[in-house]
Image (cartoon, helix red, strand yellow):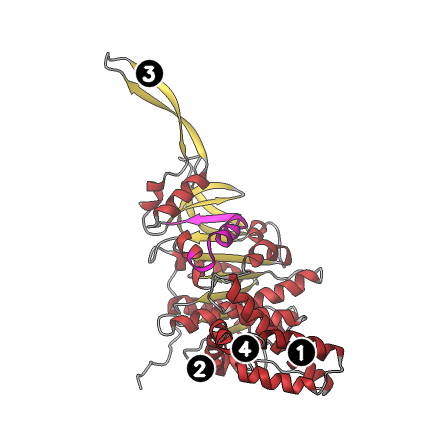
Amino acid sequence: MFMNNKKTFLGYGYRLDELHRVKKIKLKDADRKGHLFCFGSTRIGKTRLIELMMEQDIRKGYSVALFDPKGDIDLFSKIVQVAYEENRQNDLCLVTPIFPHCSARMDPLAYYYMPEELVSHVVSGIKAREEFFINIAYETTFVIVQALLFFAKIKNEKVTLNFNVVKERASYRDLKNLEEQLRDYENDPEAEEILVSLRQILASPQDYFGKVSSSLRTVLTSLSAGSVGAIIGKARANSFVRRLEQGRRVILIVQTGSLLTRKTAHIVARVLLSMIQSFVGRVYLSGEKINPPLCIYMDEASNLLYMGVEDLFNKSGGAGVWVHAFTQSIADIEAEIGPPSARKILDNTNTKVFMRVNDPMTADYIADYSGMKRRFSPLLSLGGGITVREVEEPNVRPEDVLNLQLRDFYMFSFAGAYRGRVGQVKPPYFRVKYPRLEVL
């Protein structure tokens, strides 16, 4: 279904080296495997660009995954409308902890090839720039997962893992109980190996363990309690990954309601993104490609990034996954995962779209990224003579980006450098109506 000559319409504008030739700005789908990153201030038109691109992807028959922390109803309504117009309504899958009775149940731990995948999903929800805390949480979770898999194997049972099961064994006392259970199988080499790792963890003072494991406990509690626990933490199936594993198309919408549940919303989104990254890794290592391609859209992307997400940007294109990230500034990304990881992500994004930004550092980055041009600058001397000198200046000056208007953008891609305006999107005639939120 995927053809190299397909293109995605973004808007109208001109190349920076052809200022007087206005035309449609299109991005080759073959180039989108290099991913896209868009920067723009709030209320400047990023969501409408997402809507414009997603509508075309759905009509082309691609699989789509949208992470929308705000929960834009107009965008969701347009997606549902286009899905029905293209007879793809059965591909729709909504995940939202705000309305758990309307949401799909999804266990990110249901599909895996290696135990390390399951551990990565748990750890991805931890917001920490210090690798030390991440490593402690990883080690603890890994031992728990290994023990659960071992017990299932010796009982000849199919293992069913979810976040609630892991949480029930994450405290210091629960780990001591786990040690007692494993002692019964101490002669088994696998159990002995797990016991060695477990005893190293338990050798730490209890108060020390409590401090370094608090981040892990927070994540597991957020994922296994309340509305989130009902749809993710205690779920026992995953229809989204199952469809992708079967080569079927899917339209996933993840609305986390960040204005209501700030920390929990971001944890949910990061864990689900980690789940997709793990699936992509299995496909890539099998020497296969996702067909039709999977287009991932991340609104407010800085809230979705976690340690290790840079691998999704620099490796997933070869597996048929196209990542589109939208955020306000480079500072947002650096605040979440640190400057080195942020730069690594930007370096692995071949198409960049810059709308109006308010961060001077981001504006300077855009000016440096745009490259230099030479022009002749006239000078008038005191004696009345005119001389001309050649000067170098950025193709896009920082003030040019700081002063962009609504929906205006600069784009840098394989096709060249453009200035344009996002194409108009028609408002949906179909309207999704959510239940009214009544306070208790």
Q: CA distance from mark 3 to mark 4?
A: 70 Å
Query: Residue at coordinates 39% horizontally, 72% vertically from top-left?
Result: 257
- Callout 3 environment at 10 Å: few (<14), some (14 to 19), or many (20+)? few
In this rendered view, identify the residue nearer to me: 378 or 165.
165
Magenta-highlighted residues: 335-355
Query: Residue at coordinates 32% horizontally, 21% vertically from top-left?
Result: 378
Q: CA distance from mark 2 to mark 4?
A: 12 Å
Q: CA distance from mark 1 to mark 2?
A: 35 Å
In this rendered view, identify the residue nearer to me: 281 or 201.
201
Residue 79 screen position, x and y as percent: 46, 67
Residue 76 occupies quadrant: bottom left
Upstream in sequence: badge 1 or badge 2: 1
Residue at mark 3: 387
Residue 192 screen position, x and y as percent: 71, 78
Upstream in sequence: badge 4 or badge 1: 4
Residue at mark 1: 195
Residue 252 screen position, x and y as percent: 52, 70
Q: Amino acid at mark 2?
A: Ser
